[in-house]
Image (cartoon, rainbow, N blue to C red):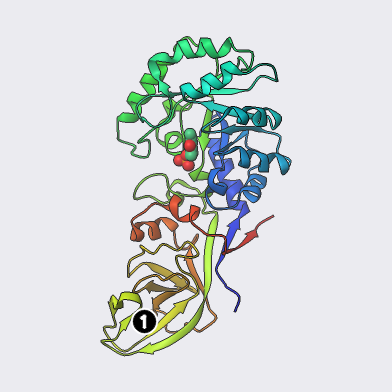
Amino acid sequence: MSRSATATIHLHALRGNLARVRSLAEGAKVMAVVKADAYGHGLERCARALGDADAFGVASIADGLRLRAAGHRQRIVVLSGPDAASDLAEMRRLQLEAVIHHESQLAMLEAERGGDPLKVWLKLDTGMHRLGFARGRAAELHTRLRALPAVDPAIVLMTHFASSDEFDNDLTARQVQCFLDATQGLPGERTLSNSAGMLGWPQARGNWIRVGGLLYGLSVAEGKTGADFGFAPAMTLTTRLVAINPVARGERVGYGATWECPQDMRIGVAAIGYGDGYPRSAKSGTPVLIGGAPAAVIGRVSMDLLTLDLREAPDANVGDVVTLWGPQLPVEVIADHAGTIAYELTCGVTRRVLFAEDGA
Ligand SMILES: *Cc1c(COP(=O)(O)O)cnc(C)c1O
């Protein structure tokens, strides 16, 4: 039997979401963040649909290479920059731009001789404490970088928010102020915001916004869906029912026998599991759709299969399409039931799932 698990990527949703980002960005340039295989949606197909973006953001040189091979000529920014001196030549060859966030990268650039100057995004830590130079060093580093023959003097100043998804958290306002203070008087473009920053913090628009989640229609704020902000989900995950079995009241279902039938009932078995990226942590009661009818996960998710309560889907038949998430069933709802976020679910769809596209 061939496996039925299919992720359908809605190209028109990607395009529409980019257009909506542009209208909300109020003139800021848009970097489409396509790291992690475009949040699990497929790098090449998404980059094609998002071809109007002003730049792409990637996590690796390898992804930059894939984008160049696909013919994209935009600016491409490697969001954590070079890891080793040998990366610099490769980045130059591919005309990739480097986020510079650490002393070790500065040393690599200072040791460079010759070659086309590299475009650099200088990342400052304004309170997230993950990547970035201490903000007090902004002016000194800016001067040092601009003096290097290996560096293009048009440096973009950058920071990243820790809590911009909480629209009432004043950490973001403090980060914005820190960034403005630290970079005051320095020439060059600025970029502060990710998706949530763009939605919640208009004062942080800068010259570039760096948007990932919203392009895929994913929620960027707790308790909300992407659709709540007018963005369309770009992925539908489906499979088929491969068995329906009558199970008697009091019998238990699945590994660990965790779920007990409260009555005689039909149990559906769908061909998808954690081997496909459906989260094992999805609890009994996590919704799915069979046709338009609701059904619910019961018992433990196994590697290849999922058991379903069919009491509310009396017409379900073997062979029916089961929707795990998509426009009719927000991935955010599944993430909630699984104790995670939508980003992790779309990123986690595995290679054995068939990918399809809809919309040209
Ligand atoms: C991933 C990433 C983004 C995009 O974040 P979203 O929340 O998906 O919009 C922006 N900036 C940086 C530095 C990132 O690593």
| Quadrant hosting residue 84 | top right
- Whether 319 is drawn above or below 180: the answer is below
Give the residue displayed 48% in from the left and 14% down from the top: 141
Using the image, determine if residue 139 lies above or below residue 198. Answer: above
Residue 288 locus on image (x, y percent): 43, 69
Q: Is residue 181 visible?
A: no
| Within-10-Å neighbours for mark 1: few <14, some 14–19, many 20+ | some
Q: Dot 1: what SS?
A: loop
Q: Is residue 12 visible?
A: yes
- Viewer-proximal residue, 356 or 17? 356
Q: Nearer the viewer, residue 116 or 218?
A: 116
Q: In x, y percent, where is residue 74?
A: 67, 33
Which x, y percent locates residue 184?
44, 12
Q: Quadrant of the N terminus?
A: bottom right
Whether 205 is drawn above or below 292: the answer is above
Residue at 51% x, 13% y is 142
Residue 279 appears left or right of 210: left
Q: In screen coordinates, is 329 left or right of 41?
A: left
What is the tally of numbered marks visible in this picture? 1
Quarter of the rendering containing residue 282: bottom left
Say which quarter of the image contains residue 147: top right
Residue located at (45% from left, 71% from top): 289
**Residue at the disc numbered 1:** 311
Disc 1 under 8 Å from ligand 1? The reply is no
- Looking at the rendered structure, the kind of residue marked 1 is Arg
- In the figure, is residue 325 to the left or right of 174? right
- Residue shown at 35% from the left, 62% from the top: 281
Image location of residue 129, percent across then percent down: 36, 29
Could you tell me which quadrant the C terminus lies in? Answer: bottom right
